[in-house]
Amino acid sequence: MGENPVVKWVFFVLANCLAFSIGFSADVESTKKTYIVQMDKSAMPESFSDHAEWFSSTVKSVAYKNDEDRIIYSYQTAFHGVAARLSEEEAERLEQEDGVMAIFPETKYELHTTRSPLFLGLEPADSTSIWSQKVADYDVIVGVLDTGIWPESASFNDTGMTPVPAHWKGACETGRGFQKHHCNRKIVGARVFYRGYEAATGKINEQNEYKSPRDQDGHGTHTAATVAGSPVHGANLLGYAYGTARGIAVADGVNVLSISLGGGVSSYHRDSLSIATFGAMEMGVFVSCSAGNGGPDPVSLTNVSPWITTVGASTLDRDFPATVKLGTGRTITGVSLYKGRRALLPNKQYPVVYMGSNSSNSSSLCLEGTLNPTTVAGKIVICDRGISPRVQKGQVVKDAGGIGVILANTAANGEELVADCHLLPAVAVGEIEGKEIKQYASTSPKATASLALLGTRVGIKPSPVVAAFSSRGPNFLTLEILKPDIVAPGVNILAAWSGETGPSSLPADHRRVKFNILSGTSMSCPHVSGIAALLKARHPEWSPAAIKSALMTTAYVHDNTHNPLKDASSYEPSSPYDHGAGHINPVKNCHQCWASCFKLPRCCFTIQRCSH
């Protein structure tokens, strides 16, 4: 869910090339910083033969020293201008130059970190669904801006795919760990952007990091496989979520851009990402972005531009149940993704300890260096959520000699249960039952508990539920425009993973898996991107606005118990500030909506070509 620092961004294709860059901020003692400079391309003087030459000359004209090339990147597609290293004084001078529309300081963007297609009604392929015809007939290309891609994953196998579309004009950049042959009919191109990072922090150590499109983090591989992965039968994470992993669309040709990251909110004309995506929209590219993981606090959204489809997160009808049985005989249900050699006997009671009287105590949060090994060795430790990553709390307990973890939600998380692949047996529980367990451990001198991990369950009710972490509206930049636009599956999502990183993403995790389960609006965004690609494939003449309208006007606001969608943080009904227009419903986009066309004029207008 975006808790790890980001080193580089990679734009890989499964993609149309949207040429803009993201700068990175860092605490570097320097007189110069990276700025994004927006230029008015129509203002180029006749004395210049091309825009790149003009951009360079304009930057040099304000530089106090001309002994170095200040330009990092030059943009001439959806965004016109440059990324350049400038002092604050130089930036102020440049802003006064003719043809300069705006200058933006660099911005650091954070990651917003199987069953989905079936849950969304997109399987089986031989059904009577409107989506049953192979999308491979339509040449769909999807672009993903993220941390890279692990090309060896079976999710990117191009067997049986048609040749790369003739209209594809992008590149396949190479570097350590990524060569030309890693691009194929599935990964039709890949580019890496790191100069802004290097300008701020120094050269990348290529012995430790890939200076190429290869994904070291895993996040980019996961989102790419979700939006456009090939079917992989038997996909699972250590036996959990066993089934067929597949993307929502096939990456062989359309104009869709999926961006699972964000960097706060600033006015539209001062936000380089907002401006760049506007340019993409003008060129017919549908852009979907993650809403952020700042919920359940109100006004916590990112990526709120009206031309962007802003995607919140919701649950699937699949869960990974586990139980905590207290020494009193009381059994409490939670979730877990642990599987390993440290498994506890499910019927044996073990000592349990809670290190704090409240969640503000650093020991109760299981932060590094706060647990006394003498106190926790050989015991199950109760840890409150907050401040540090959930899986890191498990490592802290493990390093201190603990044998298991009960991860208790606080008021910020409510009753939402997010499963993690811990390094030792761990069960996550909701706030209310977490308080009960902590009360028992704090008042009983010989408190005990057992942990039982129950595997995978489907058909969970109610579902979907709006995730507690999903960022909320209103959109304070433009209150009359509803944001988020829509919610989609973003909790406990199985997809491909990098072979470079363990499933917990911790340095101490030496396990290697082909698939991983993650949660975040980073996971919900590619679901919408994939469905948008399906719509574009069916209706290549549709504009980004028409696709967005179709998605929003066919969304539903009731769960599988026929009750209003609920908010996981409170289990009260959610509002449009939580779920936007509702939960994405690809099946209704044609079949059900067309059937009720004359009753729903707005919907009819949106999907009137569905019948052909």
Image (cartoon, rainbow, N blue to C red):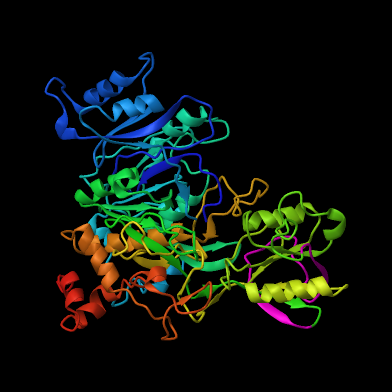
Q: Residue 141 lies in magenta, yes or no? A: no
**Horizontally, is 103 left or right of 52 in the view?**
right
- Residue 160 pos. (x, y %): 33, 55
Residue found at the far bottom of this picture:
562
**Horizontally, is 488 left or right of 438 in the view?**
left
The residue depicted at 35 percent of the width and 67 percent of the height is 486
Q: Is residue 153 visible?
A: no
**Horizontally, is 509 left or right of 108 in the view?**
right
Which of these two is toward me, 519 or 301?
A: 301
Total of numbered circles in the picture? Answer: 0
The residue depicted at 43 percent of the width and 50 percent of the height is 264
Quadrant in the rendering for residue 594: bottom left
Most common secondary structure along the magenta stretch? loop
Which of these two is toward me, 171 or 56?
A: 56
- Residue 182 pos. (x, y %): 41, 41
Q: Is residue 336 visible?
A: yes
- Residue 610 pos. (x, y %): 18, 72
Which of these two is toward me, 561 or 268?
A: 268
Q: Residue 350 lies in magenta, yes or no? A: yes
Q: Read off the magenta span.
A: 329-356
- Residue 602 pos. (x, y %): 19, 74
The residue depicted at 58 percent of the width and 47 percent of the height is 501
Q: Quadrant of the C terminus?
A: bottom left
**Horizontally, is 309 left or right of 223 in the view?**
left
